[in-house]
Image (cartoon, grey):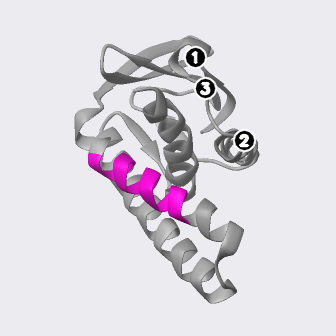
Amino acid sequence: MRLARIEIDPQSLSAHTSENEHERQVAMFDLIERNHFAPEGGTCDSYNLRLAYEDGRLVFDVTGEGFAKKTMLSFTPLRQIMKDYALICESYHDALKNATVAQIESIDMGRRGVHNDGAEQLTERLKGKIDIDHETARRLFTLVYALHIRS
């Protein structure tokens, strides 16, 4: 079971930096290329996902042949990890301008660690609703982060 198509609700996105846009595009491309995505009760080989932010909730609108299910998650439990990720991304992009290679690598390791933590939290929040593997969770976290910027 896998994702065949991903759409992010344009109303849920706000103005963003070129770095954020690039990361979002790469995550979407990589996610389509390789993922494990199995919604509870689904029997399709492939699914379409529409991500949105509505009324303080993260919306996973999943469709497939003969399948449609909307999963809504409160954004509140993810807010702290999103704030942490935003801060470390800002530090990373600032470091790219004037830090040493060792400093950049150190910040990047921290950034990847926070990203992994966010992916684990997302996996846990989706447990029993949508089964995803770690790499899928990492890429979805990047897309959820794009929605967080608006919130």
Type of the residue with mark 3:
Ala
Please name the residue shown 46% across and 26% down the image: 150
Instruction: Give 33 or 22, whichever is nearer the viewer.
Output: 22
In the rendered image, which residue does mark 2 sit on? 18
Instruction: Give 64 or 138, whichever is nearer the viewer.
Output: 138
Identify the element where label 2 is drawn.
helix
In the picture, the disc for residue 54 is: none
Q: Is residue 139 above or below residue 3?
A: below
Identify the element where label 3 is drawn.
loop
Q: Is residue 99 above or below residue 150?
A: below
Q: Using the numbered discs, state the Cα–Cα distance from disc 2 to disc 3 in whole angstroms.
A: 10 Å
Are the two marked residues, 3 and 1, in contact with CB atoms closer than 8 angstroms? Answer: no
Please name the residue shown 70% across and 50% down the image: 34
Type of the residue with mark 2:
Ser
Type of the residue with mark 1:
Asp
Which span is picked out in magenta? 80-91
Image coordinates for residue 132, horizontal then vertical, percent: 48, 47
In the rendered image, which residue does mark 1 sit on? 9
In this rendering, which labeled residue sits more in front, label 3 or label 1? 3
Other residues around mark 3 within 10 Å, as few (<14) / some (14–19) / many (≥20): few
Q: Using the numbered discs, state the Cα–Cα distance from disc 3 to disc 1 in whole angstroms.
A: 13 Å
In the rendered image, which residue does mark 3 sit on? 15
What type of secondary structure mainly makes up the magenta span? helix
